[in-house]
Amino acid sequence: MERTFAMIKPDGVRRGLTPEILARIQKKGYRVVGLKQMVISRQTAESHYGEHRERPFFGELVEFITGGPVVAIALEGEQVISGWRAMMGATNPANAAPGTIRADFATTTGENVTHGSDSPESAERELGLFFGNDELLS
């Protein structure tokens, strides 16, 4: 069993997409082992997107992700990291495969509705940023 971190970003929450996205996750058979709605602090956002710190879009990314509530999700399942990323689709919704979350709902690369860890190491780090051990189901 593998775990990953998923997030419904402020644009997805604002547009009322949380129930649809959670339904897709559950229909896929992934288990939600942690779930909370929150506003991300600037410090957490900067840690979360730390690998992009030197890129010109870093400031905009942090402003966007801290600009409204998000839904933080801990998922568990077989190959859930790659499976969730496939469900999300390409970062740029114009390149996302039909039927993916981003193809169906995202408006731009900057407002692409969801996030998912890209590796086991990122999943562990991101889950630790957003959830305490006591907040995750065993």
Image: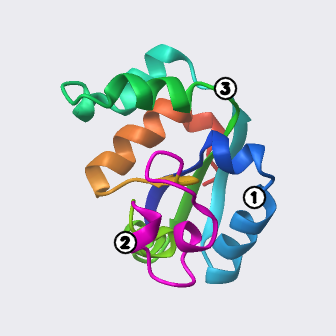
Residue neighbourhood size for the residue with mark 3, other residues' Cα within 10 Å, grouped as few (<14), some (14–19), many (≥20): some
Q: Secondary structure at mark 1?
A: loop
* Residue at image location 29% in from the left, 28% down from the top: 50
Name the amino acid, label 3.
Val
Q: Secondary structure at mark 2?
A: helix
Instruction: Give the spatial CA distance, label 3 vs label 2.
Output: 26 Å
Magenta stretch encompasses residue 106 = yes
* Horizontal arrangement in the rendering, residue 70 relative to residue 90 (left or right): right
Q: Position of residue 119 (x, y in %)?
A: 28, 57
* Residue at image location 40% in from the left, 61% down from the top: 92
* Horizontal arrangement in the rendering, residue 56 relative to residue 77 (left or right): left
Which residue is label 1 attached to?
A: 17
Can residue 1 be seen here? The reply is no
Q: Main secondary structure of the magenta part?
A: loop
Instruction: Give the spatial CA distance, label 1 vs label 2.
Output: 22 Å
For residue 57, what is the image quadrant?
Answer: top left
Q: Secondary structure at mark 3?
A: loop
**Which region is colored magenta?**
92-111
- Which mark sits nearer the N-terminus, 3 or 2? 3
Can residue 50 be seen here? The reply is yes
Residue neighbourhood size for the residue with mark 2, other residues' Cα within 10 Å, grouped as few (<14), some (14–19), many (≥20): some
Magenta stretch encompasses residue 12 = no
Above or below, 27 relative to 133: below
Above or below, 49 relative to 110: above
Say which of marks 1 and 2 sits in front. 1
Callout 3–callout 2 Cβ contact below 8 Å: no
Which residue is label 2 attached to?
A: 82
Say which of marks 3 and 2 sits in front. 3
Which residue is label 3 attached to?
A: 39
